[in-house]
Amino acid sequence: EWGMMHHEGATGMAQPLRLASIEGSIHHRSGGTPMGQLRQTARQCAQQPEEFLSMEWKDLSFTVHGKPILRHVTGMLEPGRLTGVIGPSGSGKTTLLNVLSGRQNPHANHIELLGTISSFGRAVDPAVFRRNIAYVMQEDSLLPFETPRECLRFSAYLRLSTQVPNEQRLDFVERLLSTLQLHDCAGTIVGSALVKGLSGGERKRTSVGVELITNPKLFFLDEPVSGLDSYAAYSLIEVLKQLAAAGVPVLCTVHQPSSEIFAMFDDVIIFHAGEVVYHGPTQELAAYFQSLGYACPSNFNPADHVMFLLQQEMADRLRDIKYSWEQSPACQKLVKKVVTLQQHSDASTAPADADLLLQQMLRHAASDRPRFCRQLCVLTAREVRGTFRNTGILYARLGMSVFLSVLYSWLFAGSASNGDKLDSSSFNCVAAHFDTGACTAHFQAHFGTLVSLSILSMMGCAQPILLQFPAERSVFLREYAAHQYGVIPYFMSKTLVEMPIVFMSQLLSFLITYWIMGLHGEFLLLVAVAWLLGMASSSLALLVGCGVTSGQKALQLAPLTLVPQMLFSGLFLPVAKIPASLRWVQVLCPLKYAIDLMTIVEFSYIKDSIDSCERTASDVECRQSLPGDYLRQALIHNQSIEWDQWAVYLSLLGALLVGFRVVATTFLWRKGKYVF
């Protein structure tokens, strides 16, 4: 049974240690550290056996638009060791983490990725293997109105085995909060740039805790100490050191570590311009560079010494430093380790327990996502909590709906009065005082009222949703990449929370406008149509938000989703007069179908009046007695609205509501496959 670590035998050749030897060594090192005890608890909650993973990579090269970011990088991570990646900005540190963790899309345009990534010498697909890797990104991807306790509980509910009792799950969260020194701020919201909340160190430890829930097999962190004070940075690295001592290979990038932090690393990888200039034990770094003629001064941080050296030396000397590393015994030994592992994994006599362990872990990772209903319930609970905790946005949304409804009511007061009210502007629509021009003008005002209410419903629901996903994009990508939930329950949770808010908004709007404007269609039917339009509009806005990478791009595309709908609504130009080559666009406009349905509901009295008359009198007599009704019916038909097509309009509006969300789901699924 072959493991990752090697020792020198009597013959002087590298001999593989058995996995049992690795485990015994790590157990001896971890002792009774809090993190070691916590990992044992996490393993019990996750219902996993003791497992240690390694990772090796050989000749990794990563190129973007022909520019090399990584150049023939070879290295390895061993169980129980804390490894730091150090180098100047732009040297390829973060790219290495993204490639190894499967967060980088290798198939994107203008990207080329070469080399092999393996575990126990077995080649792995990073996109699949990433389920075993906990990744803490440089920017803390946490929802601003969640607390550390809620963040950890959310992760525990979705990532721990469903067979774990709820009491044990909650107890584990509390122990993790104490271990990470978050207990005193466990009830404080995370906050953001504009909302006061946790400090930088507390936010970073919360991000670490979210990933520790799963008993990770590998732990990656990108710039975990950036922006932290010296004590907060040291405390965080101390936690990572304990985690490594408990058996987890930890890899983190550090831009410029202090001497105290640097001394805590077991191994260090030094990068410059995408190439490795050192990869080995931390305590041997100063001696290695001294052998090259670059001795570190006394009482000087070796990391600072190397960083100054790499950024101050001339290009020819840097080439010599890189060449010296490639030819050094330490580099040759490292490459030999990786090659030996891969050769053993390919040989017919390759031992089975490492391969079996890797397969078991991948099978476990593939089946560890909770059931659909559990995902939906947990996500919906978080959406509800966030909605009512961020009351400012909710009140602003409802308040804007009330304000605009009052303004519209003031502007269109009495414009939709019935044709039989002689004191209204419809006086000229009755037979005794019929005037074609005046009656047509009254209908246009009445119809314009419906169009304006529809536009109000569309805009009021689309705009708040437009920026929702861009604001949560980093959180979704982190959680989806961690295999916490699927795209469908994520969308359904947002839909379930959005539905009552949209209904409340439309109900408030019609409670204000209905009687002041003089509308006389069925009240609840008008509200229902406006609600469907609001949901369809929010679906379209969500689609746009999911299709872009930033809120700024979403705002730039907003007119393309809203203006065409108004152009094809019939307000500015009757549908019959729209060029035939463009008329098909209205099929994709929910505003058009909502206006059609509202018109049918609002003017249903016209159809009832004409049908009643035609049952007892001739067509000529009806046209003489109801000239205004026949004129308005003709004007309605001129808008390509048919009375008996209401079911078609309703079905198309519902289909657009669902269709937009299905397309948005597809966009999100494609984006979620890779973070970068």
Image (tube, helix red, strand yellow):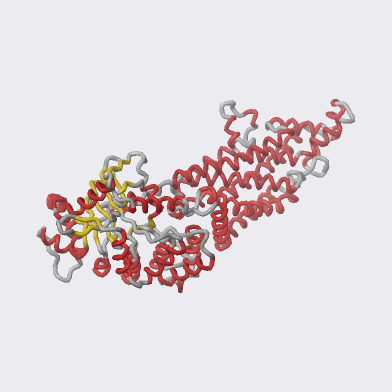
**In the rendering, at what x and y percent does residue 602 appear?**
74, 41
Q: Is residue 200 left or right of residue 636?
A: left
Q: Residue 86, located in which quarter of the rendered image?
A: bottom left
Q: Is residue 387 left or right of residue 139?
A: right
Q: Nearer the viewer, residue 189 or 572?
A: 189
Q: Residue 482, located in which quarter of the rendered image?
A: bottom left
Q: How many marks?
A: 0
Q: Is residue 239 left or right of residue 406?
A: left
Q: Is residue 42 left or right of residue 406?
A: left
**In the rendering, at what x and y percent does residue 360 appear?**
40, 52
**Residue 138 visible in the displayed image:** no
Q: Quadrant of the N terminus?
A: bottom left
Identify the residue at the far right of this view.
Answer: 616
Q: Residue at x 72, y 41 (%)?
A: 446
Q: Residue 300, located in which quarter of the rendered image?
A: bottom left
Above or below: residue 618 compared with residue 294: above
Q: Residue at x 43, y 52 (%)?
A: 365
Identify the residue at the far front of this view.
Answer: 349
Above or below: residue 420 compared with residue 99: above
Above or below: residue 655 compared with residue 10: above
**In the rendering, at what x and y percent does residue 376 appear?**
56, 54
Q: Nearer the viewer, residue 195 or 270?
A: 270
**In the rendering, at what x and y percent does residue 179 appear?**
41, 71
**Residue 582 visible in the displayed image:** yes
Q: Residue at x 90, y 30 (%)?
A: 616
Q: Nearer the viewer, residue 117 or 291?
A: 117
